Every structure is written in structure tokens, then in C-alpha cells.
């Protein structure tokens, strides 16, 4: 057998695109189709991200008791996070553990970009703690809070051209709290934004694989999440639980 890294990377994208398209064809109800698309993206990340990371559909909570909106794809730390809640079939993740928050939709449009921005903003605005880090020689200062990666994952686009000026205009709206940093239109390409502006990239027709590799690269740049103040959450044990 002759191995080819190009074939491996290409086949990974082709599998994701075909499964997203199959979900659209197979389910008539928009909610069911959306759930199926979300599952495709989650399985991609659960399979290929390094094991120190996990991906799940979840809510995010902070030590003040504030919750985010439901997020389709949350990328979070599992190596150093002391607790992840599972309650009534839902997953709840402490804000300090979150690396990224993504919405998964069938197609990208101005409405979907605005919707994703709102969801991502509900995560970024949560309070996050960061404690000093003990080590053998003393204590490191608290790690500065890192920017949470936000984005939108779709099969295709409502625009023509798919990744043109209308998309860039929609991405440029708003501020840092709700900015979409990275996204994928599986049939067309990927987009990225930072504090300097937004741009698009069409990587030879294999956007899903390009998105995965770019996300991993950005996670590598962020290293480890801050050290969570567990006692800040424990304070809630002193109040009466809701009935």
C-alpha cells in the first residue's frame, strides 16, 4: 500500500461534507437537521482534537451563577478542569475551562452570523477566575484570561459569492465580546477574524480539514486554561437550593 497524507486529509473533509449534506437530505424538520449537523461537527472534534480537549453541546456557567445560552459546540479543557456538570441530559461547563464556542447551522447568512455572535457573546461575558499557580520554586502569578475562540460552522452559504463582501460585512459588525474568530463553510472555505479585521481563505476545496487544523493551531497557541478558583463556586453551597 502506498500512503498519501494528501489523500488522508482530503478524505477527512469529504466525509464531513457528505455527512452534513446527508443530514440535510434525510431530515425534513429544521430542528432535527440542525441536531444532525451539530453531531457531525462534534464527532469531528471529539475524534481529532488532542485528548486534553473535549467538545460537547453545553451551557457555560460562572462562579457568580450566571449561565450562557445553550452552545452547539463548546471546546473545553478536561485535563485541568476539576468539574464538569451533567444534569438531566445537559452538560454545564465552568467558564474558566472554555477554549472555544461555536454555533452549527446548515448555511451561513447575515441572520445566522448575528445569531452566532449573540451566543458567543453570552459565553465571553461570563466572569472567569484565575488563581496564582504554585510550583516547586514558589508561585507563578495568575494567568491572564485568554480570548475565547468563537465561530460558526455550516455546510454552505446563502450568499453568492459565498465568502465575499456580504459575509465580511456581517462579520465586521459588533465588538470584541461577540466577534466570530473562525468559521467553516464546508462546501466553500473558511473565514477568520481578529482585532485587525476579517478575511477568508478557500483551501483547495477541503475546508473542513483546514478548519480542524487551524483550530488545533490556535488551541496550541493558547496553552492551558487559567487555574480555576474552586472555592468561588463552593460558596453557592451556603445558599438554599431552588425547589
Image: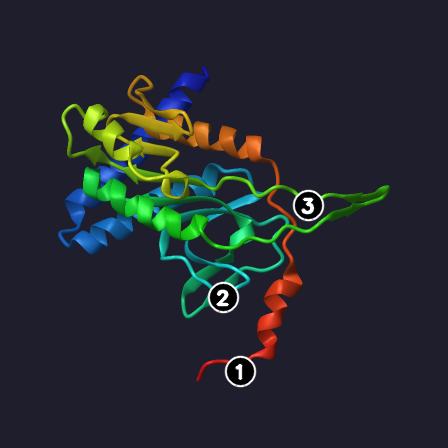
Q: Position of residue 74 (x, y in %)?
A: 43, 48
State the residue at coordinates (41%, 29%).
194
What's the CA distance linking mark 3 and mark 1? Answer: 32 Å
Density class for disc 3 (Cα within 10 Å; few <14, some 14-19, many ≥20) is some
Asked if the residues shown at circle 2 and circle 1 are in contact, with their CB atoms under 8 angstroms apart, the answer is no
Disc 1 is placed on an element classified as loop
Quarter that holds the C terminus:
bottom left
Q: Position of residue 203 (x, y in %)?
A: 33, 19
Residue beneath label 3, please? 142
Residue beneath label 2, please? 65
Query: Disc 3 or 1, which lies upstream in sequence?
Result: 3
Q: Position of residue 191 (x, y in %)?
A: 33, 28
Density class for disc 1 (Cα within 10 Å; few <14, some 14-19, many ≥20) is few
Disc 3 is placed on an element classified as loop
What's the CA distance linking mark 2 and mark 1? Answer: 13 Å
Please give left or right for residue 97 compared with residue 203 in the image: right
Classify residue 189 by image quadrant: top left
Query: Disc 3 or 2, which lies upstream in sequence?
Result: 2
100, 144: nearer the viewer:
144
82, 151: nearer the viewer:
151
Residue beneath label 1, please? 240
7, 206: nearer the viewer:
206
Disc 2 is placed on an element classified as loop
Depicted 166 relative to depicted 229: above or below: above
What's the CA distance linking mark 3 and mark 2? Answer: 22 Å
Amino acid at each position: 500500500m502506498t500512503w498519501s497524507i494528501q489523500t488522508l486529509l482530503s478524505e477527512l473533509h469529504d466525509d464531513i461534507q457528505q455527512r452534513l449534506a446527508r443530514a440535510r437530505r434525510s431530515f425534513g424538520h429544521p430542528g432535527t437537521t440542525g441536531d444532525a449537523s451539530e453531531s457531525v461537527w462534534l464527532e469531528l472534534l471529539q475524534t481529532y482534537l488532542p485528548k486534553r480537549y473535549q467538545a460537547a453541546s453545553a451551557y457555560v456557567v460562572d462562579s457568580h451563577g450566571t449561565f450562557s445560552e445553550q452552545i452547539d459546540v463548546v471546546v473545553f479543557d478536561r485535563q485541568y478542569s476539576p468539574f464538569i456538570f451533567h444534569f438531566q441530559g445537559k452538560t454545564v461547563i465552568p467558564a474558566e475551562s472554555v477554549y472555544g464556542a461555536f454555533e452549527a447551522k446548515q448555511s451561513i447568512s447575515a441572520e445566522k452570523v448575528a445569531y452566532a455572535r449573540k451566543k458567543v457573546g453570552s459565553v465571553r461575558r461570563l466572569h472567569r477566575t484565575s488563581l496564582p499557580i504554585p510550583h516547586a520554586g514558589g508561585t507563578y502569578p495568575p494567568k491572564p484570561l485568554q480570548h475565547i475562540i468563537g465561530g460558526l460552522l455550516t455546510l454552505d452559504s446563502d450568499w453568492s459569492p459565498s465568502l465575499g463582501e456580504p459575509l465580511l460585512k456581517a462579520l465586521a459588525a459588533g465588538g470584541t465580546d461577540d466577534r466570530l474568530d473562525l468559521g467553516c463553510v464546508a462546501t466553500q472555505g473558511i473565514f477568520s477574524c481578529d482585532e485587525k479585521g476579517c478575511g477568508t481563505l478557500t483551501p483547495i476545496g477541503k475546508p473542513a480539514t483546514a478548519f480542524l487544523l487551524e483550530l488545533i493551531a490556535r488551541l496550541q497557541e493558547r496553552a492551558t486554561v487559567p487555574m480555576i478558583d474552586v472555592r468561588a463556586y463552593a460558596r453557592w453551597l451556603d445558599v438554599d437550593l431552588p425547589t
